[in-house]
Each structure stands twice: as structure tokens, then as C-alpha cells.
Image (cartoon, grey):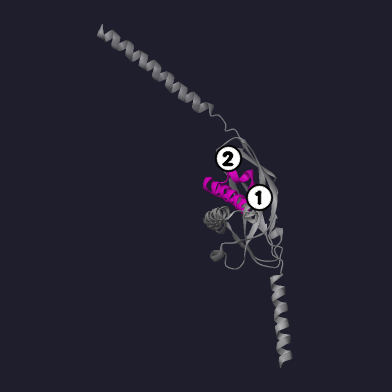
Amino acid sequence: MRSILVILVVVLALLCVEVVSGDVGVGLWWDLSEIEGKAGDKICGQFGLYNPFDTDIIAYLDVSGELIDILEKGLSEKKRKHETILDQLSELRDKYRGELSEEEELETIEEIRKLESEQKVLEDYLNKIYEEQSVYIKAGTSSKDRIMKEICFYPTKRGIYDGEVIAKNFKTSGVASTGSSVSLGVSASLKVIALRKDINYRMIAIIVGIVVVLIVLGIWIKKKRNKTSM
């Protein structure tokens, strides 16, 4: 009886290992390396998500590099602040591992706790955004079965912005409740070119014409009043 129980335990353990070790990832399809538009306008590109692995996923698109700076204003600021906090935390944790006085150690711990609290708030915000933008993709799909997702940028100034579009996947268990994401992903380089906005010469001509008419009309009225007073 004991030997049977041992065999059952071993079999169950092997099954668990097989499930955990299953490949998880996401595929990214693209046919562009740059997009362009006018500064001040929305500039968008299409990317495809698919899942060639053996586990269903929930995937979304993220960006890196200079592309972060031309996302929607609120999202752009939050992502940059999150990156800054992560860098600060890394420096403080390295400092904490060094030789510190008791007072310095307490100050460092307090700074770390404060930044970790800010980090949690930002991650909750970002994960909520990514959850809203994510899509469910069944396992074993190819690029032919890709789900197209649009990603948009809002450059306010003329320039060239370099970065990467990254396909990432949330954990398949309880995305809504955990909001955490897996680091596995694949990226594609993207350049966003923001050109100078066209000058509307017709509108300028109309405005100049109206101003000229108003000036001439003002001079005429003034002359007429002067004649009347005489």
C-alpha cells in the first residue's frame, strides 16, 4: 500500500513539473520600422500579437526608449516616474548592502519604504491601463492568426523618436486580481517621425484680409467723424 502511495506522489510531482515548465511567451508581428505624421497630431501604427507557445496568455503592447515620452501625457509621465523610482530603489538597496552607521541604515530603510509605496501606486495604475489594453490569445497560434493592435503616439514637437514596441504577457492566473506581468516578451524597433505642421496660408490670408479691412474701415470712420465735426 505504501509503495502505491509513493508511486502516486511521484507521478503527481512529475505532472506538476510538466505543467509549470510549459513554454510561455508571446509573438509579435510587424511590417514597419517607422511611422510619421505631423507634430501635434496623433500618429499610430499597427502590430500583431500571437501565441506560438503551449499556454494561453493575455498580452498587451508596451514601449521603451524615447517612445515613452510621446505616449498620452498621463501615461508617459507615470511610466517615466516609475522608471526613475526603480533606479532610485536599486541605488538605495546597493547602499543598504554596504557599511552604514545605525542612523544611516535607518534613513536608508525609510527612503526604501517610501519609494516602494510610490512604486506600488504607480504599478497599480500602469497595470490597470495594460489590463484594459490587453487581449486573450489561445495557445498554438501563428502569425497568420495574429490579433492586430494599434498603438498611438502624441508628439507635440517636431523630431525623430527612437524606441521599441514590446509584446508582453500577463500571468494567465488572475490578471484582474494580481495585476502582475511576466517579463517574457519580444520587441521590434520603431522610429516615430514628427514633421512640422503645414502652414495654413489660406487661413493666414483670410486673417490678414480681415485685419486690413478693419484698419481701412477704422480710418474711414475717423475721417468721416472729423468732417462732421468741422
Q: Residue furthest front?
A: 101
Give the residues drawn in magenta, as a range: 64-92
Q: Which of 212 and 53 is in front in this view?
A: 53
Residue at (29% x, 9% y) in the render: 226
Say whether residue 189 is visible. yes
Magenta stretch encompasses residue 91:
yes
Left or right: 204 as drawn, with respect to 166: left
Could you give the CA–CA distance between mark 1 and mark 2, rounded to whole angstroms?
16 Å
Q: Which residue matches tag 1?
A: 165
Instruction: Indicate the amino acid at tag 1.
Output: Val
Q: Is residue 96 magenta?
A: no
Numbered mark located on residue 155 in the image? 2
Q: Contact (CB < 8 A) between labels 1 and 2?
A: no
Q: Position of residue 114 (x, y in %)?
A: 52, 54
- At x 45% / y 21%, what residue is drawn? 209
On the picture, is 39 further left or further right than 163? left
Q: Is residue 170 placed above or below 107 in the rendered structure?
A: below
Within 10 Å of disc 2 (Cα), the crowding (few <14, some 14-19, many 20+) is many
- Secondary structure at badge 1 equals strand
Q: How crowded is mark 1: few (under 14 residues within 10 Å), some or many (20 or more)?
A: many
Find residue 33 and report its image quarter: top right
